[in-house]
Image (tube, coloured by chain):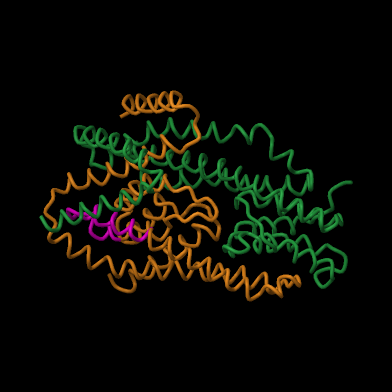
Amino acid sequence: MGAPVVSTATWLATYLRLLAVQGSWNYETMLGNGIGFCAEPALRSLPGGANGRPYREALARNARYFNAHPYLAGVAVGALARAELEGVDPATIERFRAALSSPLGSLGDQLVWASWLPLCSLLSLAVFGLGASPLAVVLVFLLSFNVGHLGLRAWGLAVGFRRGLGVASALSAPVLRRAPLYFARGATALAGFAVPLTLHRAVGGDLSLALYTAAAAFAGALVVGRVARRSQGWRLALAAVALLVLYGVTR
Amino acid sequence: MNLAELLPLVLLGAVCGLDAVSFPQAMISRPIVAATAAGALAGSAGDGLLIGAVLELIALETLPFGASRYPEWGTASVVGGALFAQQGAHAGALPLAVFAALGAAMVSGSSMVAHRRLIGRAARRARAELENGSRQAIFRLQLGGLVADLIRGGIVTAVLIAVFLPIQRAAVEVWTAPAVISNAIVVGLAAAVAGGIVWNALPAGRRRVRGALIAVGVIAAVLVG
């Protein structure tokens, strides 16, 4: 059966709403209400339109508890909307929802938060370390990150709607499985490049001071790496900076 | 800082706070962007960029997985960028601004938790309407959450700038540690946090591979630098 026809306006409305999918994120329904909010334009095509019973029942189903990475929520929105428009029975849709949540969460976390974001962040730090202007650094970060961000949201919505209940095969594509590894390796290499240069520029360009600071930072990284399992590194940094501030104002 | 100077920063903090989770998550809330923008509004984009880079090193550690609790860097970076740009020429300004930003990240992270609980209560109250497929209830919850997050970011930014600015002004007057050394300590701490997370948390494969990649990067930095 071919995909139900969805107008360009509906596509665009759904895509734009996906940018706000986490607007009502809470510990009870998590992303649920956001999924309903995003699927709503497509569901108006159900028999009876926005005032019909099929629309209200579908909307209620879509707004229930759900969790996923926000950039991959479009996969769920597209697939669920298609299932509703094809008249798939509600029990099947509920099972599909339950099965989809975990892979969309874990894939997105590995692909975006643990690899793509650090890669773009370190790229911008590398540009900073090379002496670029504030505008250049900001643009490098925003452009590089959002090419991936917006592209992933668009791909997710498109593949969800195209594959419907068969979308799982798209999520297990080799490129999606391998991408986090390659992004993370790129980020790791960039870290070796960007952090020393950032450090050098941030301490004012004094090479000997930068070298001493880098050596101390390396030792500190080993400590952070050991204790970060029990306490987050940023909290350690806060405590250390607090001690420095106390020393600086009381000495 | 008068109201005309504070208001744009509060608006920026509100927008960055919103971007952190709710809309559009385009990462304008990342320190390298938010602090630079705040610095520009407060009179020095260069100072904003410097503290933005320092905070970005620390923020590399934050992996905002779903229901986990994490610092909110958007408003924190606006606070830090604004404070540092105001006092950047003074010794102690960077450590004080970074301290304020890290404190703000913690406070703002807690405010995010409160915001989510607020939405949860609203969702419980609207449960019957939601189960009935009410479009109005869905929209009300969604838009209410967005507006509340925007207001949250603005309030947190305003309050923390108001609290930390006089503290920073007083502290730089009595700061005795040499500026170069205290700045280097802060930068070194940030680099240590970044190094720790790069080594431990990025899914880059085995230790030898990670070590080799870092070495390649360092060699490239030495050649270029």
Residue at image point 40% right, 52% down: B31
Q: Quadrant of residue A130?
A: top left
Measured as percent of width and height from the top left, residue A43 is found at 78, 62
Vertical arrangement, residue A46 with respect to residue A215, above or below: below
Residue sitting nearer the eye, B4 or A87: A87
From this view, report whether residue A135 is shown above or below residue A221: below
Tell me where the magenta segment starts and ends, as one range.
Answer: B83-105
Say which quadrant the N terminus of chain B sits in: bottom left
Of all chains in the rendering, the one displayed in orange is: B
Residue A158 located within the stretch drawn in magenta: no
Our reading of the magenta stretch's main secondary structure is: helix
B192 vs B140: above or below: above
Q: Is residue B104 magenta?
A: yes
Chain colored green: A
Q: How far across and down, in percent of the image, does residue B214 sit?
A: 39, 28
- Left or right: residue B175 compared with residue A231: left
Residue positioned 45% across, 55% down in the render: B70
